[in-house]
Image: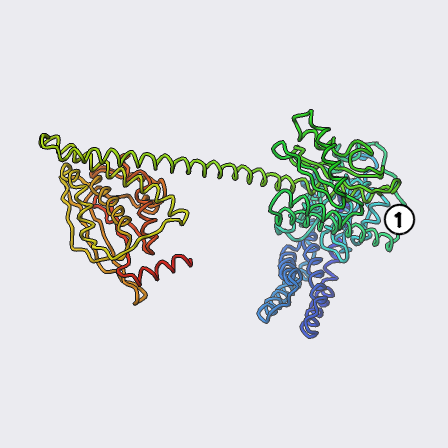
Amino acid sequence: MERLAGKLAALRENFVNQLPERLQTLEKTWLDFQQQDQNPEALKEIRTMAHRLAGSGGTFGFPALSDRSRELEQFIQGFLLNETVPSVEETEEIEARVSALRRVSEEAMGGGVPEGENASLFQQISPTPSPSDTPDRSVLIVEDDPEQLAAFAAALAEQGWKVHKAADGLDGIRAAFAEMPDLIVSDVMMPGLSGYHLCRFLKSSTHLRETPVVLLTSLGEQIDRFWGQQCGADAFMIKSRDLSKLLALTNTFLSSQATRPPGGPRPSPTTPTPRGVLSAQVAGMLDGLLRETKLREEVARLGRTTASLEEFQRASLEFLAQIATFDKSAMLMVLDQELLVATDRASAEEFTALVDRTRQAIASNPDLTDKINRVPFNVPDQQFSEEGGPYLTAPLNADGQDFGSVCIGRRTPGDDFTAAELGLFELFARELGAIAAAAWGREVISRKNGELQQLTEMKDRLSELLVHDVKNTTWAVGLAVESLVDDPNLSEQKLRTIKEASTGCRLLADMLVSLLDIAKMEEAEFRLNPSLLNTSQLAREVMEIHESRARRRSVALELEDLPEIFADADLIRRILSNLIGNAVKHTQKGRVRVSATTADVDDARDRLIQIEVADTGMGIAPEFQKELFQKYVQAKVQKKGTSTPRGFRLDRGLGLYFCRLAAEAHGGRIWVESALNEGSRFLFLMPADEATFTRLRKARESS
C-alpha cells in the first residue's frame, strides 16, 4: 500500500507541475476560437482539455478543479451536440467559466501534496484477493489522459491483477482482441472513437461480447447513463478521488464466476490488428448498425402509414424488394380463420397454386395460427418454388404468438442465398413481427368495430320500426279515448279521468315522434317546415296539456307575452312541452314561468329571441349541468334540505337531447342556469325572422 501511495503522490505532483502549461494551452485555444470565426474544432479541443482536467482533478484530490472543469465541459458540450455557436452572452459565460477554472487551478498549484492524503484513499478498500485465488486475471484500461491512465493502472496492479493499457478507443479495441482481458475499463470521452463506440463494437463481436465493460466519465448527467446502457456497458461510474470504488467494482467483476472461472482456459489472444485494418472493421460495424437502424425505422413507418392489413402486407413486400434480391416473395397471415396472402413478382398461377396448396395443407387443422408458420413454405419444391430454386422462410411472431410467415425465393436452381442475405432477411422478419402484430391487431379491432356498427345500425332500424308501430297504436288509443269525451252519460269524475288519459296519449305520441325525429336529425335527414309563429299561443296550448298535473302539485303556470319567432311549429311545441313538463315534474308548491327577451347578437342583421322556462324547483348540481343535453344522460337532483342527490331523474335521457338537436337545427342553442334549492332556468335561442333563420342555417351547414 505504501508503494502505491508513493506512485500516486508522484503522479499527483506531476499533474500539479503540468497544470500551468495545460491551463495556458486551454486559454490560448479559447482566444483562438474567439479570433478565428469561432471554429468548432477549437471548441472541441477546449471540451477535451476540460474533460481531462475534470477527470484528473477528481482522481488526484482537487474537487474544486474537477467541478469547474466539468461545468465548462458540460456547457460547451451543448453547443457541440446542437452544432451551434455561442451567442455574445454565452461567450461571456464561457469566459467567466474559464476565469473560474484559472482561479481554482492556481489554488491547486499552490496547495502542495498533503502528507498521507493518497494513502487514505485506500483505507476502505476490501482485502486484496490473493493471486492464488484468481490466477491469471487481467484488466484492460483505456484512458487518453496519461496521468489518469498511470494512476488507474498502478491501483489495479497493486490489487494483484495483470494490467494492459491503451491510450484511445481504437488502440483499446486492438488491445482487447490481442490480449483477451477478463475486464475492460474505459473512459467515455476520448478523441476518435469514444468509450461508447468501443463498448458497442466489443459487445457486437463474437469473442468479446461476454467480457464485462465498465465506463468511466467525469459527467454524471442522466443522458450519459442512458447512452452507457444503450451501448451495452455492464457498469457506469463517475470519476472521483475515491479510487476505492473503482477497485471494489473491479474486484467484483474479476472475482465473479460470471467471468472466466479461476484456472479456466484463457481465450487465445490474436495477432494485433493494424490500425488501418481495425479502422475499416469499425467502419463496417457502424455501417451494419446504420443498416439495422434504417431497416427498423422503415419497418416502423410501414406500420404507421398503412391503413389495412392487406395494404401492410403489400407495402412490406415492396420494401423487402429494396433490401434483398429475389425472384418472388410472399407473406401469409391468418385472421379470424381467414388466410390472407400477398405476393410480389409471382405470377397469377403461382399465387393461385400457393393459396390452394396452403389451404389444403392446413384444412385439417383448426388452429391455423399454429400451422401457418410451418406449412406454407416448408414442403421443398412444392409450395412456392415450382422450378426448384432456393427460398428462405421466416416466422412472423410477437410475444410468443405466431400469426404468419414471410418467404423469398429464386427460380434458378443452385442460386443459393448467402449468409449475409440470410441474416438481413431474418432481421427483416424479426423487426416486422412486432409491427405486423400491431397491424394485425388493428385489423381485428377494425373488423370488430365494423360488426358492432352493423349491429348498432340494425338495432336502430328495429327500434325505429318498433317506435313507429307503438306510435300508431298510441294514436289509435288516443282517438278512441277522445271519442268517449262526448258521451253525455259520463260522470264528472270519469270525464276528468278520460281527459287525463287523452292527455297522456298525446304526450306519449309526442315522445315517440321525438324518438323518430332524433334519428332523422342525427343523420341530417330531418326537414324543417318553418313559418312565423305566434309563440304565446303555442306556449298556452302546451301549458293546457300540463295544467292538470301542475294543479295536483300546487304549481302555478305563468305565461308572459312572447314575441313571434320564425321556426318549425311542431318542434317548438315539443321543446316547450319537454321543458315545461320537466319543470312541473321537479317543482313542489311553486311556479313555472315562461318568458322571452330579445337577445344581444354580434351581427346587427340578426334578430334572435331568447325564450326562458324558469321554475322554483330543487335545482341542478353544477357537475351535472355540462352533460345535461347529451344523449341518454340522466342527471340526479336533490330535494330541499338534503346535501346529496337522492336518485331523482330529470328525464329519460332523450327529452333534453331532442331539445338541443331541435334548437341547433334552427341555428340556435339551448342551455341551463341553475343552483341547488334555488330553481332552474332553461333558455333557448330562436330566429325572429326568415332572414335570420336563413343565415343561421347556412352558417350551421358550412361548419
**Quadrant housing residue 425:** top right
Give the side of residue 324 with respect to residue 554, left or right: right
Expressed as whole percent of the image width and height from the top left, the position of residue 76 reads 65, 62
Picture quarter with the N terminus: top right
Give the side of residue 528 with respect to residue 496, left or right: right
Q: Say above or below: 496 vs 323.
A: above
Name the residue that disc number 1 marks.
272
Q: Say above or below: 308 vs 70.
A: above
In the image as oriented, which residue stretches furthest toward the bottom?
A: 35
Bin the neighbour count of mark 1 within 10 Å (Cα to Cα): few under 14, some 14-19, many 20 and up. Answer: some
In the image as oriented, which residue stretches furthest toward the top?
A: 364
**Type of amino acid under label 1:** Pro
Residue nearer the viewer, 120 or 323: 323
Q: How is the image coloured?
A: rainbow
Residue at x-position 15% and y-position 48%: 558
Expressed as whole percent of the image width and height from the top left, the position of residue 285 reads 79, 50
Instruction: Tell me, yes or no, if residue 8 can be seen here.
Output: no
Instruction: Tell me, yes or no, if residue 532 can be seen here.
Output: yes
Expressed as whole percent of the image width and height from the top left, the position of residue 32 reads 71, 72
Residue nearer the viewer, 470 or 647: 470
Picture quarter with the C terminus: bottom left
Residue at x-position 38% and y-position 46%: 520
Expressed as whole percent of the image width and height from the top left, the position of residue 488 reads 9, 32
Please give the count of numbered marks on the rendered protein. 1
Element under label 1? loop
Give the side of residue 26 with respect to residue 644, left or right: right
**Quadrant housing residue 191:** bottom right
Give the side of residue 265 with respect to residue 101, left or right: right
Residue nearer the viewer, 668 or 173: 668
